[in-house]
Image (spheres, rainbow, N blue to C red):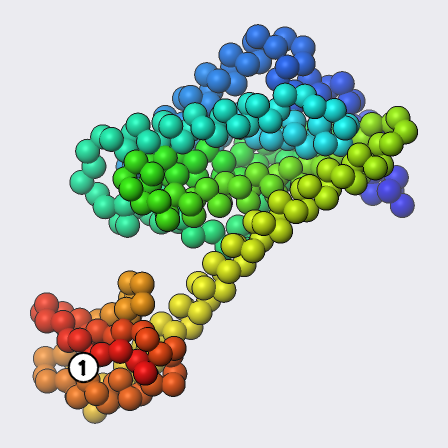
């Protein structure tokens, strides 16, 4: 069965040897000096490009950084090390690389910037990861591992580099830390860790299926131990991702409820309409456009009682600048 899967994933004539794969993924193998200087040079440059792209909210610049970022090489090297049951130094390059990228982000955050972080799409899109980010990362890791093991699909690797976000989240961590936004920094770090775990797990799975595991006695036990470690790390990632996904879903549900009830509240005023609902922590802000006086805010609060959790605060923001404090849902 495994041989059939192996043949379908990578035909024998396209399968790269273990020596070739090791030479590509292990920086301490072969021409170590050339590999390490290239790795650190490209990592520093990709960190600068990614951080500049994040601070200028430039998607094209961030994508450019993703393409040249070399951090996925030692991460896949970790997967290969787990399969072979041998340490190969990849963890050192990953660990120091992470610190380096974050440090670049912190340094760039010291440059005066008039745009608030909350208005920067490159930052806000990376500080609240959910389970779909993990699913995408696993699929990307599988694609990357298969591409590394085949001789004929190397052209897809730039696409894999774009799909899996490694350096940009770390740049966001540094920028947010430098700006004092620790909670956002932790969110971006969670995105990187989930992508890291997904890449390693996908790499271990593909390399095992393709038969790159070590042969000596005890190999199965060693690989099982590696799977247990990675599985425990995956659980640690799944818990906050799952909670964040649930939180996003609940907030979206409550926002929809507030919008619907506010629209019914204004039904008696034909010229009044709800233009949107935002939330800031436990406060929901209803944006209303109306040339006439609004119905009693107590009526709106009564409508929301029992429909959204108690303790949530509600405000109505009129387009001409007036803000009405509706009260707290009981």
Residue in the foreground of this view, choosing between 179 and 273? 179
Quarter holding residue 277: bottom left
Residue 285 point in image, percent of width and height: 25, 70
The reply, left or right, for residue 192 in relation to residue 175 is right
Residue that sits furthest to the bottom in the current view: 268
Q: Residue at x 36, y 27 (%)?
A: 104
Q: Looking at the rendering, which quadrant does residue 313 occupy?
A: bottom left
Q: Going 32% across and 83% down the picture, which residue do you hit?
A: 330
Using the rendered image of the protein, determine whether residue 206 is visible from the camera's viewpoint: no
The residue closer to the viewer here, 101 or 25, is: 101
Q: Is residue 237 left or right of residue 317?
A: right
The residue carrying mark 1 is 272
| Residue 102 or residue 294, whichever sits in front | 102
Quadrant of res 72: top right
- The one nearer the camera, 222 or 297, is 222
Q: Is residue 117 above or below residue 74?
A: below
Residue 96 is left or right of residue 123, and the answer is: right
Count numbered badges in the picture: 1
Quarter the N terminus occupies: top right
Q: Is residue 223 left or right of residue 28?
A: right
Mark 1 Cα-neighbour bin, 10 Å: few <14, some 14–19, many ≥20: some
Location of residue 43 in the rendering, given as x and y in whole percent from the top left corner: 46, 23
Q: Is residue 47 visible?
A: yes
SS assignment at label 1: loop
Q: From the viewer's perspective, is residue 249 above or below residue 206? A: below
Residue that appears at 43% across and 25% down:
100
- Using the image, determine if residue 300 lies above or below residue 114: below
Q: Position of residue 210 (x, y in %)?
A: 80, 34
Residue 217 in the image, given as x and y percentages of width and height = 90, 29
């Amino acid at each position: 069965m495994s041989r059939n899967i192996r043949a379908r994933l990578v035909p024998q004539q396209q399968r790269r040897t273990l020596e070739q794969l090791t030479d590509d993924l292990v920086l301490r193998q072969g021409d170590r000096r050339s590999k390490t200087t290239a790795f650190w040079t490209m990592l520093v440059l990709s960190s600068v490009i990614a951080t500049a792209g994040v601070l200028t909210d430039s998607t094209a610049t961030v994508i450019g950084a993703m393409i040249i970022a070399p951090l996925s090489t030692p991460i896949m090297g970790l997967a290969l090390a787990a399969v072979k049951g041998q340490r190969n130094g990849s963890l050192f390059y990953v660990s120091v690389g992470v610190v380096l990228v974050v440090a670049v982000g912190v340094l760039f955050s010291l440059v005066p910037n008039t745009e608030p972080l909350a208005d920067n799409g490159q930052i806000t899109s990376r500080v609240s990861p959910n389970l779909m980010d993990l699913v995408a990362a696993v699929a990307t890791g599988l694609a990357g591992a298969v591409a590394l093991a085949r001789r004929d699909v190397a052209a897809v690797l730039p696409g894999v580099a774009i799909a899996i976000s490694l350096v940009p989240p770390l740049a966001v961590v540094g920028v947010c830390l430098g700006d004092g936004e620790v909670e956002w920094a932790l969110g971006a770090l969670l995105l990187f860790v989930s992508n890291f775990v997904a890449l390693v797990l996908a790499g271990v799975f593909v390399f095992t299926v393709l038969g790159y595991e070590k042969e000596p006695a005890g190999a199965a036990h060693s690989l099982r131990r590696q799977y247990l470690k990675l599985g425990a790390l995956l659980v640690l990632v799944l818990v906050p991702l799952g909670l964040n996904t649930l939180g996003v879903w609940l907030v979206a549900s409550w926002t929809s409820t507030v919008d619907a009830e506010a629209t019914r509240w204004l039904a008696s005023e034909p010229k009044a309409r709800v233009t949107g609902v935002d939330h800031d922590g436990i406060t929901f802000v209803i944006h209303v456009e109306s040339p006439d006086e609004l119905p009693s805010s107590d009526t709106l609060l009564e409508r929301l009682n029992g429909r959204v959790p108690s303790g949530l605060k509600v405000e109505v923001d009129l387009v001409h600048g007036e803000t009405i404090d509706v009260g707290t849902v009981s």
